[in-house]
Each structure stands twice: as structure tokens, then as C-alpha cells.
């Protein structure tokens, strides 16, 4: 979030020191884009209903069927080693990692959960990853039984037990 504020301050100083010219609309366009991304950041939320895990933000989001989930594990973006600057800043949040390949990311923090399903893994960062993983695991187990890697299963034999 701090980077958005820094961008807004830089744009402010550009507008303040630049005389009005034919390119005067550019700082305002940049301000609009930064404010839009900031609104997307603050609107990020995660819900679990009877059939889906939803990661939502303004003008976008992902939905993953609970029946398709195969792994729930703690992860950090730094551990995934995503390459490319635009994955986290991009509209869609599509990233690449040498450990998991392509994955989608709808996050507000670098620590969270990596949920693997039928298509691409999804990285999310709920406020309380432990409680969220427990609830997600409980609902997923009602569809498909125990998972091989499931940090939210209190009785499971997961090999990814490290709490973030």
C-alpha cells in the first residue's frame, strides 16, 4: 500500500511544479490509475460459501469450486519466487513461479495461502490465514475427504504444517 501513496506524492509534485501544457492530462491519468489500483487493494475480500471459494476485488476476482481443490498450504510470495514485476501489479494477477508454475494471485500481503485446484493455483492473503485455512479445509473435506496437503485439517497428516 505504501507504494501507492509514494506514487501519489510523486505525481502531486510533478503536477505542482509543471506549468500547464498540452500534456497536463497525463498526471491526472496517472493519479486515476493509482487510485483505481488502491481501491482494488482495499476492496480485496475472500468468502467461502457452500460450493465455492471466492477471491474478489473491484472489477475482478476468481472463483474456485470447493470440489476442485486439491491442496491448501501456507505460502509466501517470496518463497514462490514469482518472476516479473507486472504479476502483482497487473490487472489479473497472473504470475509465474519456478516451484508451482503459473498461478493467480489476489492478495494484499506477501503471506497467505496457496490453494491448488483444477486449473491454476490461487494465492490469497486472508487476515487470519490459520482460521481461514481451517474453515476452507472443513468445507473442502465435506466434498472430497482429506487432502494430501491440507494445513487446515486438524487431524490430517499434512507435510506443510509451518504456520506463516
Image: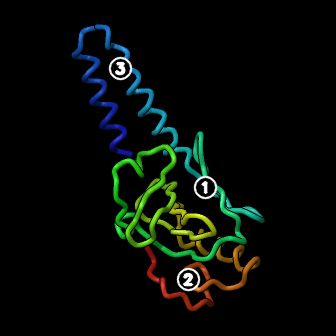
Which mark, by number, is residue 149?
A: 2
Residue 139 % position (x, y): 72, 73
Q: Is residue 5 above or below residue 96?
A: above
Residue 42 % position (x, y): 51, 44
In screen coordinates, is 104 left or right of 111? right
User: For this rendering, which residue is in front, 95 or 140?
Assistant: 95
Considering the numbered disc 3 on the image, is that residue within a helix, a strand or a loop? Answer: helix
Question: How busy is the neighbourhood of tag 3: few (under 14 within 10 Å), some, or many (20 plus)?
Answer: few
State whether residue 87 appears in this view.
yes
Question: How busy is the neighbourhood of tag 1: few (under 14 within 10 Å), some, or many (20 plus)?
Answer: many
State whether residue 125 appears in this view.
no
Would you say the residues marked 1 and 3 are in contact, meaning their CB atoms lie under 8 Å apart?
no
Residue under the point 49% across and 55% down:
107
Considering the numbered disc 2 on the image, is that residue within a helix, a strand or a loop? Answer: strand
Residue 71 % position (x, y): 58, 76
Residue farthest toward the left in the current orientation of the protein = 17
User: For this rendering, which residue is in front, 50 or 132?
Assistant: 50
Going from N to C along the chain, the mark reached first, 3 or 2, is: 3
Going from N to C along the chain, the mark reached first, 1 or 2, is: 1
Quadrant in which residue 58 is drawn = top right
Which mark, by number, is residue 26?
A: 3
Number of numbered discs: 3
> What is the spatial separation of the Cα atoms under label 1 and label 3, in whole angstroms?
32 Å
In screen coordinates, is 26 left or right of 162? left
Considering the numbered disc 1 on the image, is that residue within a helix, a strand or a loop? Answer: strand
User: For this rendering, which residue is in front, 87 or 160?
Assistant: 87
Would you say the residues marked 1 and 2 are in contact, meaning their CB atoms lie under 8 Å apart?
no
Q: Which residue is mark 1?
A: 55
Quadrant in which residue 15 is drawn = top left
Residue under the point 37% across and 61% down:
82
Q: Quadrant of the C terminus?
A: bottom left
Amino acid at each position: 500500500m505504501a507504494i501507492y501513496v509514494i506514487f501519489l506524492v510523486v505525481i502531486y509534485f510533478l503536477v505542482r511544479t509543471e506549468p500547464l501544457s498540452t500534456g497536463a492530462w497525463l498526471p491526472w491519468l496517472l493519479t486515476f490509475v493509482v487510485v483505481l489500483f488502491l481501491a482494488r487493494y482495499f476492496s480485496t475480500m475472500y468468502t467461502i460459501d457452500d460450493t465455492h471459494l471466492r477471491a474478489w476485488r473491484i472489477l475482478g476476482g476468481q472463483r474456485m469450486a470447493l470440489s476442485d481443490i486439491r491442496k491448501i498450504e501456507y505460502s509466501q510470495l517470496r518463497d514462490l519466487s514469482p518472476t516479473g514485476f507486472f504479476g502483482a501489479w497487473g490487472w489479473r494477477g497472473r504470475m509465474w513461479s519456478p516451484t508451482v508454475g503459473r498461478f493467480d494471485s489476489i492478495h494484499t500481503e506477501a503471506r497467505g495461502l496457496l490453494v491448488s485446484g483444477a486449473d491454476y493455483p490461487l494465492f490469497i492473503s486472508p487476515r487470519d490465514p490459520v482460521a481461514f485455512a481451517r474453515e476452507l479445509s472443513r468445507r473442502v473435506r465435506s466434498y472430497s475427504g482429506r487432502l494430501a496437503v491440507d494445513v487446515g485439517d486438524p487431524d490430517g497428516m499434512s507435510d506443510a504444517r509451518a504456520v506463516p
